[in-house]
Amino acid sequence: MSYHHCKLIASGVARLHGDLLLVQQYYPGDPLPSWGLPGGQVEPGEELLAGLQRELLEETGLNLVGTPTIAFVLQVLRKTEEGIQEWLACHFACEVADQISPQDPDGLVLSAHWVEEQAALEHLGTDSGYDCEPLRRWLCGEAAGKLGQMWTVFEVKRRKSASIIGIDHS
């Protein structure tokens, strides 16, 4: 079995008056820009919530208000010729403040917008690499209370399967 690193991702799920905060980004090699939740890789030695704050500020210009709570976690496993790639994406319910003004040092974020929740899910659904089901379930309140959601997504030749694991946080 080959060794692999797990990359830690912090992502914000910010809601405001029925809208969801999204970023539109363009990755080199992709045919079109895509939509996503604001967030990105936590730097080595960086605390998870500090990474979330940094990514939100870079991608949207907005600051965290209060203490975020975990919404759901995605474990993404991708088989490649080099071995298994793995990401652990922690999605946090959070409140944000200030004016939208992306300052992405990577130059990938084209814009950030508050988008009506159903339209946001439709935008996110256009990306074949993004599974909207965990977010959809969280938005519907299925992860309310002490029971959170942990999803594992296996990507093999662009096909995905997912499983739900209940996690008791008590």
Image (cartoon, grey):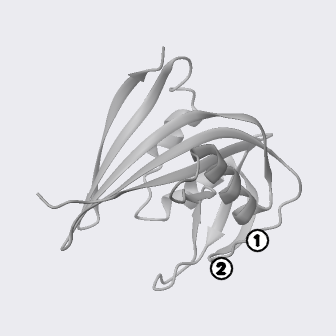
Is the residue 85 above or below the residue 70 in the image?
below
Q: Position of residue 11 (x, y in %)?
A: 58, 50
Residue ranking furthest to the left: 1
Name which residue lies at 44% across and 58% down: 130
Image quadrant in which you'd find residue 81: bottom left
Q: Position of residue 85 (x, y in %)?
A: 29, 62
The 10 Å Cα crowd at callout 1, few under 14, some 14 to 19, many 20 or more, is some
Q: Which residue is mark 2?
A: 107
Q: Position of residue 110 (x, y in %)?
A: 69, 75
Q: Amino acid at mark 1?
A: Gln
Q: Quadrant of the N terminus?
A: bottom left
Image quadrant in which you'd find residue 109: bottom right
Is the residue 25 above or below the residue 96 in the image?
below
In the figure, is residue 99 to the left or right of 41?
Answer: right
For the residues labelled 2 and 1, the Cα–Cα distance comes to: 8 Å
Name which residue lies at 70% across and 39% down: 94
Q: Identify the element where label 1 is drawn.
A: loop
Q: Identify the element where label 2 is drawn.
A: loop
Q: Position of residue 32 (x, y in %)?
A: 54, 80
In the figure, is residue 86 to the left or right of 27?
Answer: left
In the figure, is residue 37 to the left or right of 150?
Answer: right
- Checking the image for residue 44, the label placed there is none
- Checking the image for residue 103, the label placed there is 1
